[in-house]
Image (cartoon, rainbow, N blue to C red):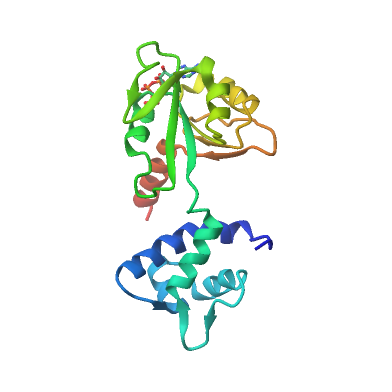
Amino acid sequence: MNKKIPEATAKRLPLYYRYLNNLLYANKLRVSSAELAESIQVDAATIRRDFAYFGPMGRRGYGYDVRKLITFFEKILDQDTLTSVALIGVGNLGHALLNFNFHKNSNVRISAAFDINPELIGSVQSNVPVYAMANLQEQLKDQRIEIAIITVPAAIAQAVTDKLVDAGIKGIMNFTTVRLSAPDDVRIQNIDLTNELQTLIYAVNHE
Ligand code: ATP
């Protein structure tokens, strides 16, 4: 599978994957693009186009084989390999994420946390060890961690990012309000919870 998948398609894969697993769980072994469209709110033509990138996946009038699709998506999504993630900043939000730790998806987990607070360093929070920032480089390397979540105060978010980049991180999930700068080959995913909530409130109030 070397064909490059468009980004929009790649973004929908986890959605497809999760829904197909629900179907399998309910013993439903076949699904049509129309049924999928109805359930996940993506139009059927888009689904057919997405699936077509992966080769012949369905037959006309038969629908898609749920198990076949799941096996296929697992490979693409690397569900069979465990991805370790680091978390920087064990404050309120950091604690919540450590506690949450992506349990619904057993292939991703936060395996190391970092902070400057001496009371936290050396402790274990929600089964995750907290290390000093001085150990960042060493731990990321030892644990082969390429993804980091940032939940530090905004004022030091860029400095932390620079350290992560130096340590070879490839992707950053940014929960601070700061627009981070990093080299082009480092992906940054911004998640501003306040902004998301405001957007929702605005939409509700202006409907
Ligand atoms: P939030 O609710 O946003 O998680 P908070 O109010 O609990 O935040 P903050 O002051 O935002 O706490 O700090 C979050 C965490 O980041 C704290 O545990 C703090 O010790 C840690 N922190 C502060 N500066 C640094 C730094 N330079 N490097 C790593 N961690 C830091």
Residue 173: image x %, image y %?
51, 37
Residue 144: image x %, image y %?
56, 34
The residue most toward the front is 142
* Nearer to me, 203 or 64: 64
Placement of the C terminus among the 4 image quadrants: bottom left
Placement of the N terminus among the 4 image quadrants: bottom right
* Nearer to me, 116 or 122: 122
Image: 96 above or below 197: above
Residue 35: image x %, image y %?
40, 76
Residue in view at x 41 percent, y 78 percent: 30
In the picture, measured across the screen, residue 141 lies left or right of residue 203, that is right
Residue 84: image x %, image y %?
48, 38
Image: 159 above or below 205: above
* Nearer to me, 196 or 158: 158
The residue most toward the top is 118
Residue in view at x 48 percent, y 89 percent: 61
User: Ligand 1 is in which quadrant of the figure?
Assistant: top left
Image: 114 above or below 199: above
Is residue 42 visible to us here? no
